[in-house]
Image (cartoon, rainbow, N blue to C red):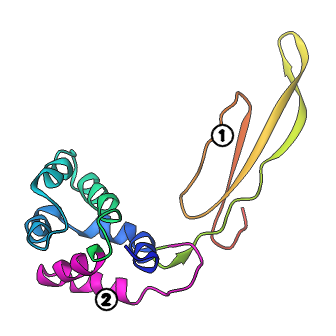
Amino acid sequence: MEDIDRKKLRRNRCALVENVEPHRILDHLIQHGVFTPDMIQEITSKETIKDQTGKLLNMLEKRGQDAYRHFRSVLLETGYEHLVEKLDNTANNTADEIDGRAIRPAQQGISSTLQIRNNQGRQNAQHVTNNVIGNNNFAVFGGHNLTINHFNHSGSG
């Protein structure tokens, strides 16, 4: 698959997972030679429709140069014109995006030593703060003492 097509799929992954019902397109993808019946069985073995669509998209990226073109055609054949339009209108820039919104990397974790009081007095403890920028996204980087700050799209807390 061309890198530009892979990026279009990734940038629109949420819209595809939310909207595509795999049972509507899987036979078409077999007919176009994108997937084999065994691959379809692997996709449909997932419990939820969203998990099935996610698996389909993961496998699609590894199915050769024509996979995206066939997938796009199948979407048109099965009534997903709005998704094809969304894919076609995806900018060809190099910024990472999800559903057309830029993803900014989180700030590097800041490490500091804090004094923590407990029943036995004071103890030194390593404390790591990680800042996460995004919309309802967060990450956890283990440890007993952890602070996660969530920022909205404008970058304020």
Residue 85, magenta (yes or no): yes
The quarter of the image holding the N terminus is bottom left
Q: Mark 1 and 2 residues: CB-CB less than 8 Å, in contact?
A: no
First to last magenta residue range: 68-97
The answer to whether 125 appears left or right of 105 in the picture is: right
**Picture quarter containing residue 10?**
bottom left
The quarter of the image holding the C terminus is bottom right
Question: In x, y percent, where is residue 150?
Answer: 66, 56
Residue 77, magenta (yes or no): yes
**Picture quarter containing residue 124?**
top right
Residue type, mark 1 in image: Phe
Which element carries disc 2, helix, strand or loop?
Answer: helix
Q: Earlier in the sequence, mark 1 or mark 2?
A: 2
Please name the residue that numbered disc 1 is placed on. Answer: 141
- Image point (34%, 59%), residue name: 58
What's the mark number on residue 85? 2
- The residues bearing labels 1 and 2 have C-alpha atoms spaced at a distance of 38 Å
Between 45 and 98, the one nearer to me in the picture: 45
Dominant secondary structure of the magenta stretch? Answer: helix
Between 127 and 53, the one nearer to me in the picture: 53
